[in-house]
Image (spheres, grey):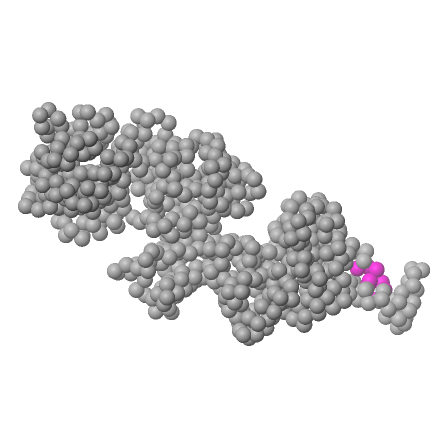
Amino acid sequence: MDKPIMTGSLESSDCLITLYETDTPIIEVDTIVHDAFHDHILHLIKDVLKHYDLEHLSVRIQDKGALDYAIKARLKAAIEIYEDDSNG
Amino acid sequence: MARSYLFIPANEPRMLQNAYVFDADAIILDLEDSVAIEEKHEARHLAKSFLKDYPKDTARTYVRINTQADWLERDLACLQDLDFEGIVLPKMTLKMWETYEKTALKQGFHKPVIGIVETPEAFFELDAIASIEQIEGLILGAEDLVSGMEAKRTLEGHEILYARSMVRMACAKHHILAIDTPWTNLEEAHLQKDITHAITLGFEGKCAIHPNQVPVINEAFAPSKATIDFALRVMKKYEETSSMRFSLDGQMVDKPVLQRAEDTLKKARFYGLLKEDRS
Amino acid sequence: MQIKDVLLNEEKKAVKTFLNHFNLVYEDDIDLTLVLWEEDTLVATVSAAKNIVKCVAIHENFQGKGLLNHLMSTLIKRLNQRGHTHLFLYTQPEHVALFEMLGFKKIVESMNLSFMEMGGNIETALNELREAHELTKRPKGAVIINANPLTNGHLHLIREAKKHHDHLLVFVVSEDRSFFPFDARFKIIEESLQDVEGITILPTKDYLVSYATFPKYFLKHESTIKKEHALIDVLVFKQYYMKIFNITDRYVGDEPYSPMTNTYNKTMKQYLNGDLHIIERKSIEDTPISASTVRKLLKHQSVDAVSKYVPKATMRFLQSPQGEAIIEEIRHREKRH
């Protein structure tokens, strides 16, 4: 990956996802909603990464109140770009 | 059957989540014109995730796809195995249908299709387009058509009168849905006037590009209280007389009037305008 | 509504006029401007000069609808495409909340100005830098130099500072806005200091910026701009660099002939007090040695003319093909900071 992959946006109900490579993977959750959702979003992201066997990647999410379906969609869109890049 | 077809940009979560709150009879998730080229990929994922995970509503849900061959292929691929009503295929012509059908066949994709006729070419093959089995209705796309004609879209609508009439006739001949063009100016009085043109010609519904247009369209395309009441009286009298020909309020009722009354009540029931206890 | 790049002069003019309503000036170094149009109405605009977001404004009638979020998201993705993943922004303190909504985080704030970032975190970055160099918690002195190029004046400053500390940190400005690229500047310094014990040479990372990068578009008077630039720089240094690297004293060279550096040093003195030490600049035949003196000599005279002002490593670089190319550039370009 030559540069981080970004999907989504900072519009309300959306989230901006940055998928990138680091030596030690980190997941950074920055959300406008209540702290209780912080862990929920973290788990959601971990689950998707695990599903694609990509737990070595780092993710930063700037969440503007996105629902699960939107977070998943944004992350999967980023992952697909990553996989296309890696395969071609 | 739907009065209003509301376009929802497929790459905007805020709009998607609100898609069902505006009481549109149908929504069209748009992967085409309202999505910038660089966002197509993300929009597909979002539309897919929305259709898969977001709670359904009674509104019929369609997806407008892209026409460029490779995008069309990717659009259909991402829509596989999802629960929605059908595809809205823009720039509909026989040639476009060929492209669509080939891709759909290859992917084993079976859904009803509403075509948007919006190029001059389409109007010279409208009968053939309307006769295609999977085509469940046609939308008139006046904006693109008018620019293809190098004409100007006006409130009077003379420039599209011929096209509008053609669409209505082709749909009537083949018993498919006739859906009127969106009106892009947000002024309500103008929308009202444009709707009147469509209703005069017999259109059954209209596209909306803004949620504010939905209630106006719903009200206009719903059968009026007078029409419903008349239909109820016709049916009541029909039950009493058990004859296909009778007189009501000094007027002759025959088979076509009966048929219309039945249609009216069917629509009224579907749009929730009929309290069953009234009949 | 549609987002468009500003491509034509006419469009640029429209943006300038729009920004004027907000008392903002379109800056010359901007290399990307996006505009949100509603038909012929300019609704909102954002710009960037490399990784610095600038000139953000939205029409009064369109505020509060999340349109800036849309525009900013597009800008962020476009900058990411250009390789700018770590973004900075300067704004007035009253707009901090707005930019926090847009994903920026505050680094420091003065009376008139807030300095913000996105896609990076100053504490994380500096802690990583500290760990990478295995720096201990022991108190240290520090100098920050651009070294464009390294002169005997810089070396004098470093040696003087070192006298007071077991461990001295030499920060080299990372920002590449100078004739001499960062890699070359860094390497020359390493070579010149390799026999001195107790010195660690580090990049400043992206946080201490040159005056050239500092935005001037919403500050009216030049003297205010200079002061604000110095202030932000000092605040960043004090709140982050001093804390994270455990720096007790900072050393700077005096600059009797540069009013700009003077303003800078004065501001620094106000905020760092006894922690700041101004060292008299080394002179040769009454000419204080500075990088700008050296560049001036390179512009008008032969390479040999600078030999008494710079260390051997600088000289070797100047005589290399890369160095010759840079001298050529200095000779052909107008005066530049």
Question: In which quadrant will I find the N terminus of chain A?
Answer: bottom left
> Which residues, given as a range, are shown in magenta?
B228-236
Q: Quadrant of the C terminus of chain A?
A: bottom left
Question: Residue at horizontal 49%, vertical 36%?
Answer: C10
Query: What is the x, y in percent for residue C78?
Result: 41, 50
Residue C207 percent across, percent down from the top left: 27, 42
In percent of width and height, residue C52 lies at 35, 42
Who is closer to the viewer here, A79 or B276?
A: A79
Q: Position of residue C280 (x, y in %)?
A: 11, 28
- Residue C92 forms part of the magenta stretch: no
The answer to whether residue B51 is visible is: no
Is C87 situated above or below B207? above
**Residue B121 quadrant:** bottom right
Residue at 78%, 54% in the rendered image: B200
Q: Is residue B232 magenta?
A: yes
Counting labels gives 0
Query: What residue is shown at x 47% (from left), y 50% (from top)?
Result: A12
Left or right side of A1 for C325: left
